[in-house]
Amino acid sequence: NEITERFKWTWGTTRDVYNTYISEKNELLTKWVSIENCLNEVTSQLSSLFDNWYNAYNKWNYEDAIIYYKQYLEINWDTSSSNYNSAKNNLILSYKAFAAVYFAKKDFNNALINCKMALDIDKNDSNILTNIWACYNNLWDYDNSLNYYQEAYKNASDKSTIDDIQKRIELTKEQKNNQELLKNAPTNDQLSWYQYYLKQLNIIDAWSKIKNNNQVIVAVIDDWISINHPDL
């Protein structure tokens, strides 16, 4: 009787453990199927985003290309994968291309915004730093221009790039010095201090010799003019 009771107890316990195992196994299998479905969905989304980016980029629609790749990086959590790094590089490429579009339109503020977004991803890209320098230079902000060019100088590796950056740094310093000299120039042109080349032409000396002379005739000879230019 005792052996029979122990057998029943052992069998009952074994059966319970087995049933629990089967239940947990089925639950895990269900979860695994769910995870696998999620992974397949994510993979499909990533592939779709990559295709969308590729199409947008080749159609020069850089704004949409940037949106697609930012979404791609948010979904792809494997930051060490080659696909993730490739996506990151393509996002930088999109920001650079978008900045170039604005630069061609002489919209240096928006070009600057896109260059800085690219720099947030790769802070050691000397090419991006050079582009930021160019934006600030065209905005006549020589202090920031110098700061970014000095950063580019630190990150440059080949000799030709280093030599080129050194020349540009010297040019920017000269532009800044000329800008300071022209701030107090005897003229009613509020933008004269932006025009660093006036000092190189000795215009300040000319202004000091001829004042309020209505007899001076000025002819502007060029291929074209901008009728909206503030000087006209």
Image (cartoon, helix red, strand yellow):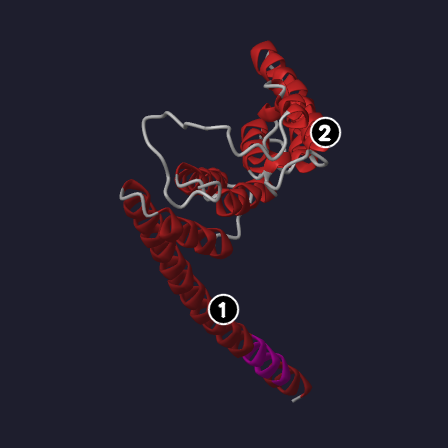
Relative to 196, is 170 above or below? Answer: above
Q: Residue at x 39, y 51 (%)?
A: 63
- Residue 83 magenta: no
Query: Tag on residue 28?
Result: 1
Specify the amino acid type for callout 1: Leu
Task: Tell how many labels.
Answer: 2
Specify the amino acid type for callout 2: Leu
Residue 181, x across and y down, in percent: 72, 29
- Residue 11 magenta: yes
Is residue 156 visible to the viewer in this orientation of the structure?
no
Q: Residue at x 66, y 24 (%)?
A: 209
Residue toward you, 221 or 65: 221
- Magenta span dominant secondary structure: helix
Residue 92, x across and y down, in percent: 48, 40
SS of the residue at dot 2? helix
**Viewer-nearest of labels 1 and 2?**
2
- In the orientation shown, which residue stands out farthest toward the front? 215
Relative to 178, is 84 above or below? Answer: below
Q: Could you tell me which quadrant the N terminus lies in?
A: bottom right
Q: What is the span of residues highlighted in magenta in the rendered image?
A: 9-17
Q: Residues within 10 Å of mark 2 (few under 14, many from 20)?
A: some
Q: Is residue 45 left or right of residue 171?
A: left
Residue toward you, 68 or 116: 116
Residues tagged 1 and 2 counted as in contact (Cβ below 8 A): no
Give residue 38's quadrant in the image.
Answer: bottom left
Q: Residue at x 32, y 26 (%)?
A: 223
Is residue 46 visible to the viewer in this orientation of the structure?
yes
Q: Residues within 10 Å of mark 1 (few under 14, many from 20)?
A: few
Q: Residue at x 32, y 48 (%)?
A: 61
Residue 112, x across and y down, in percent: 54, 43
Q: Which residue is mark 2?
A: 181
Residue 89, x across and y down, in percent: 48, 37
